[in-house]
């Protein structure tokens, strides 16, 4: 009975599970963009900025400290396991008209901007930006649940995704 009341109260604010997921993910993407901007604000070197972004994308957010209303680590787990469900739907064009994906696009644009600062001749900065985000989520998920889809070893588990993405990114960008 109590679970039924909790479920009903959630649907008072969200029409369905997908809209709740979109809300949670927008919160996550906005927070990630804030973290990126905060961490790189005094860093001038684009390579160091990219490494910082890769590090942020490839590790869980820390446990929330104090009495906050949400758990950042749980928020990142939701993003890793469920973010593709937000846009891999038939209604994505219609949803996109409402600027629902703006925080995600803003983060991709910021990454693209830094990629161009690192290599101004690179033709596909937005594609690499979104690929970094999605690959980060896939590799973290696969490392934990489907390790044979990765090259992770038990010793590398914590830093595997960051190492993979750094190697991938800087080889593509012509290091």
Image: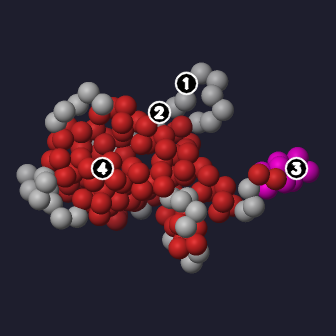
Mark 3: give few (<14), some (14-19) or many (20+) Cα within 10 Å.
few
Please give the label number shown on residue 62: 2
Who comes first in sequence, dot 1 or dot 3? 3
Disc with the residue nearer the chain's start (4 vs 3): 3
Question: In the image, is 69 to the left or to the right of 159?
Answer: right
Q: Secondary structure at mark 4?
A: helix
Which contiguous range is marked in magenta?
1-11
Q: Which residue is mark 1?
A: 65
* Contact between labelled residues 1 and 2, with CB atoms less than 8 Å apart: yes
Mark 4 sits on what residue?
A: 111
Q: Main secondary structure of the magenta part?
A: helix
* 10 Å crowding of disc 4: few (<14), some (14-19), many (20+): many
- The answer to which image quadrant residue 150 occupies is bottom left
Dot 2 falls on a residue whose secondary structure is loop
The reply, left or right, for residue 112 in relation to residue 106 is: left
Q: Residue furthest left?
A: 175
Which residue in the protein does label 3 denote?
A: 5
């Amino acid at each position: 009975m109590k679970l039924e009341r909790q479920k009903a109260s959630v649907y008072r604010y969200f029409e369905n599970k997908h809209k709740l997921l979109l809300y949670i993910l927008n919160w996550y993407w906005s927070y990630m963009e804030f973290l990126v901007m905060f961490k790189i604000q005094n860093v001038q070197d684009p390579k160091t900025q990219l490494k910082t972004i890769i590090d942020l994308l490839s590790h869980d957010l820390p446990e929330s400290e104090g009495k906050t209303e949400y758990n950042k680590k749980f928020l990142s787990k939701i993003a890793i396991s469920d973010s593709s469900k937000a846009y891999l739907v038939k209604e994505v064009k219609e949803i996109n008209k409402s600027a629902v994906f703006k925080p995600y696009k803003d983060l991709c644009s910021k990454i693209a901007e830094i990629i161009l600062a690192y290599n101004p001749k690179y033709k596909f900065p937005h594609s690499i930006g979104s690929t970094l985000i999605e690959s980060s989520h896939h590799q973290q998920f696969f490392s934990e649940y489907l390790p044979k889809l990765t090259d992770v070893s038990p010793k590398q588990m914590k830093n595997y995704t960051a190492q993979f993405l750094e190697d991938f990114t800087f080889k593509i960008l012509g290091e």
